[in-house]
Image (tube, rainbow, N blue to C red):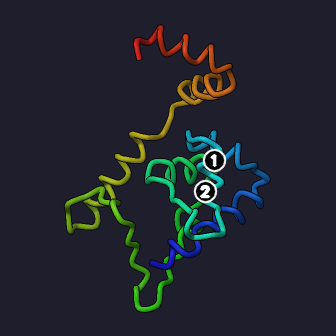
Amino acid sequence: MRYLQTFNSRLRQIREAGRLSSKDVAEICGVEEAKVVSWEASDARQRTYPDVSALLDFCIKTETPLEDMLDLTEPGGGGQLELPGLAFSNSDDLSTALKELEQEIDRIQLSDEEGELLRRFRKTTAENRRMILQILGA
């Protein structure tokens, strides 16, 4: 799958074009900065890939079309998107599958209030995070 070969450079180009640091992308996706660095690794042996939720978070929060992140022009692939583990619908009906995808995107999209809470949580100290989690019983 060609996207596995080009994802790292596409992410880096989009990140740099948006003037985002690796830390910014990590905050957007809710992961450690080291994870973003591994997504962009030039050496395929050190490279990892984001899970679907992190990828969708990045696309939604930066208003980046998914097709800009992935190379869908694999020769002979007919533009068919094949992501391992990406199965959001068991339906062969495209309209049903699209409706289910829209519901899934709505489910993971943060409200303005949730986004503000998350931004504040991420900016606070590690000790404050632990106290907040204790208060929440997590």
Q: Mark 2 highlights which residue? A: 38
Residue type at numbered disc 1? Ala
Q: Is residue 22 left or right of residue 89?
A: right
Residue at image coords 61%, 53%? 63
- The x and y percentages for residue 59 are 56, 54
Q: Mark 1 highlights which residue? A: 34
Q: In this view, does 96 lie to the left or right of 111?
A: left
Local packing at callout 2 (Cα closer than 10 Å; few below 14, some 14-19, many 20+) is: some
Residue type at numbered disc 2? Ser
- The x and y percentages for residue 52 are 43, 54
* Occupied quadrant, residue 39: bottom right
Q: State the SS at label 2.
A: helix
The answer to the question of whether label 1 and label 2 lie on touching residues, with beta carbons closer than 8 A, is yes
Residue at image coords 20%, 60%? 90
Residue at image coords 28%, 63%? 95
In the rendered view, tell whether residue 8 sits above or below residue 23.
Answer: below
Residue extending farthest front: 45
Give the alpha-carbon distance from disc 1 to disc 2, as whole Å: 6 Å
